[in-house]
Amino acid sequence: MCIVTMKTMTHALRAKSVLSAKGISSDVIHLDPSVTARGCAYGVSFSCGDSDEVRRVLDGKGIAYGEWIGGGRAADAVRHDIP
């Protein structure tokens, strides 16, 4: 799993929507803000194999994003205490 961080839920939902339109499976997730440099609290998770296409789609649609988190670090970033 890889994650691209977003500052707001609105950005994350928009990212999920445009990725879905391009056939890329993703999920909006709540992050532990302490694990990101900018304190981003939301993100979009997706298969790491889709990373290049995710970047192209988000850049092409002008959707602002923060860090890219991959591998085991991505699993550590997800908040599981939020319903």
Image (tube, helix red, strand yellow):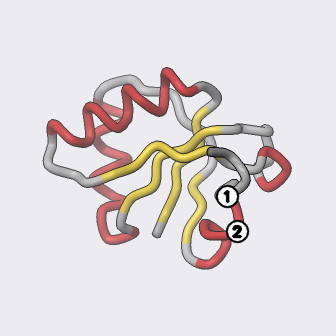
Q: Position of residue 12 (x, y in %)?
A: 47, 33
Q: Position of residue 55 (x, y in %)?
A: 38, 47
Is 30 rendered above or below residue 12? below
What residue is disc 1 on? 80
Q: Quadrant of the C terminus?
A: top right
Q: Nearer the viewer, mark 2 or mark 1?
A: 1
The three-letter code of the residue at mark 2 reads Asp
Residue ID at (68%, 46%)? 82
Distance from disc 2 to disc 1, alpha carbons, whole Å, reads 10 Å
What residue is disc 2 on? 76
The three-letter code of the residue at mark 1 reads His
Q: Residue furthest front?
A: 83
Q: Position of residue 63 (x, y in %)?
A: 43, 26
Question: Nearest the camera: 37 or 24?
Answer: 24
Residue ID at (28%, 39%)? 57
The quarter of the picture where residue 19 lies is top left
Q: Residue furthest right?
A: 34
